[in-house]
Amino acid sequence: MTKKTIDFITLGCSKNLVDSEKLMGLFEANGYHVTHDSDDPQGEIVVINTCGFIEDAKQESIDTILEFAQAKTEGRIERLYVMGCLSERYLADLEAEIPEVDGWYGKFNYKELLNTIGTIGTIDTIDTITAPRHLTTPRHYAYIKISEGCDRHCAYCAIPIITGKHQSRPMEEILEEVRALVAQGTKEFQVIAQELTYYGIDIDGKQHIAELIEKMADVEGVEWIRLHYAYPAHFPWDLLRVMREKKNVCKYLDIALQHISDPMLARMQRHVTKEETYELVKRMREEVPGIHLRTTLMVGFPGETDEDYQELLDFTRWARFERMGAFAYSEEDGTYSAKHYKDDVPADVKQARLDRLMRVQQQISAEIEAAKIGKTLHVVIDRIEGDWYVGRSEFCSPEVDPEVLIPSSESLTIGAFYDVKVTDAEEFDIYATTRI
């Protein structure tokens, strides 16, 4: 009997990617052939894992669903299923509007697809925790999701509406997953969560993120651990000690700060002040010399004045973030700000503020990368592309940060680590050689 092929399409964040990989592993373990993000899916079944975070992501998800609904109408695929954040949030509306979809699953019940597609047993008879993941990343790195949900309830954010309350995974379960991936050849781990500093609070009222990362670092074979999506209020300072003492914990932290002016922070319900934020950044740089900070900032939140925005510019120039993303506020259904604030900053003003902020950051980024010329970096090689090996240092997360380009004539190994000397730098790329 020919194996049926299921093509998974993953939209949105790396947390969605982990869900897709786990489900792919389950189907693969039960006799299905799985593919991921094929340009032209040839499988009988397509599963789309959607994002519903902001308007652009929602539109991309809807457009993708409609594209494959048309493919089903034309007979190019047999069945179409949708899972993830968008269907968790808008299930009833989507079912009515797109009847071509054979089944809709949310953020948490997607494993029921195992019961729906074919006769491969039921969830009750399949170990969905220990089943191997089908990595869609290069084998040498993987994302590790340590929790789901968020209890922070920032005014603008729909994530708690979609994902519910924070739920930490058991520590030993996470460590077992790390050990299993190391046994398969994974060396680098991106630790992800909606809010990783909250890890453990729902279990015993204490923050256990530092303990978890320290134990992960002690797993033999773990070369790099990188931390994503921290929260500034009540930051667990012991995490900086772990980062400083453990050589395989990258000096890198992704911490979304959103704004700096006290009026904006209060209206956003961030539970942190301008003074505390300045002190946070200062202390991180003092306790972990060389740390690279990634942050996300928002412009155009309801009520943002020219003075608020100027404070944000001044803060950006002072903080000199090594990595920064920014976006303009968009009103999201069901959030506190949608219910209580008027979206009163004109679209053209939002865009102008965003453009200026990014110009400031681009100059900072160019200067920071240029300062690395002549220095030695430890890098991992992700792939070969044209005339270059493409790698990353500990200061660079996959997909979003600058990459290190090394001439393909140097004959390197994908997934291996090398010391390289930086020969040149641009805003988004570093050029280097292993011939030190």
Image (tube, rainbow, N blue to C red):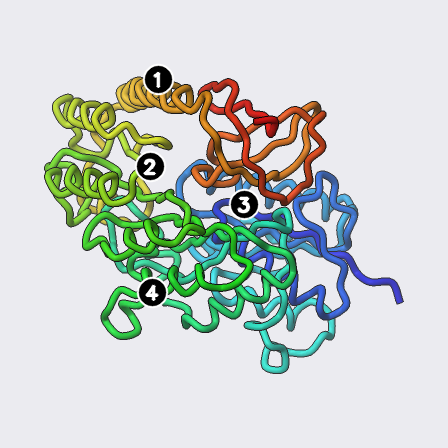
Q: CA distance from mark 1 to mark 3?
A: 31 Å
Q: Amino acid under label 3?
A: Leu
If you read the primary sequence from the N terminus, does the residue marked by circle 3 or circle 2 appear first?
3
Q: CA distance from mark 3 to mark 2?
A: 33 Å
Q: Residues within 10 Å of mark 3 (few under 14, many from 20)?
A: many
Q: CA distance from mark 2 to mark 4?
A: 22 Å
Front disc: 2 or 1 = 2
Q: Secondary structure at mark 1?
A: helix
- Residue 205 sits above or below residue 383 on the image: below
Front disc: 1 or 3 = 1
Q: Amino acid under label 1?
A: Gln
Front disc: 3 or 2 = 2
Name the residue tied to disc 4: 211
Q: Amino acid under label 4?
A: Glu
Residue 42 percent location from the top left of the image: 78, 47
- Relative to 116, 322 lies left or right: left
Nearer to me, 130 or 7:
130
If you read the primary sequence from the N terminus, does the residue marked by circle 2 or circle 4 appear first?
4
Residue 219 percent location from the top left of the image: 49, 64
The residue at the point 52 percent across, 19 percent down is 423
- Residue 160 sits above or below residue 167 on the image: above
Q: Secondary structure at mark 3?
A: loop
If you read the primary sequence from the N terminus, does the residue marked by circle 1 or circle 3 appear first?
3
If you read the primary sequence from the N terminus, does the residue marked by circle 2 or circle 1 appear first?
2
* Dot label at residue 2: none
Name the residue tied to disc 1: 363
Q: Residues within 10 Å of mark 2 (few under 14, many from 20)?
A: few
Name the residue tied to disc 2: 290
Q: In which quadrant of the rendered view does residue 348 lie? A: top left
Nearer to me, 93 or 202:
202
* Dot label at residue 11: 3
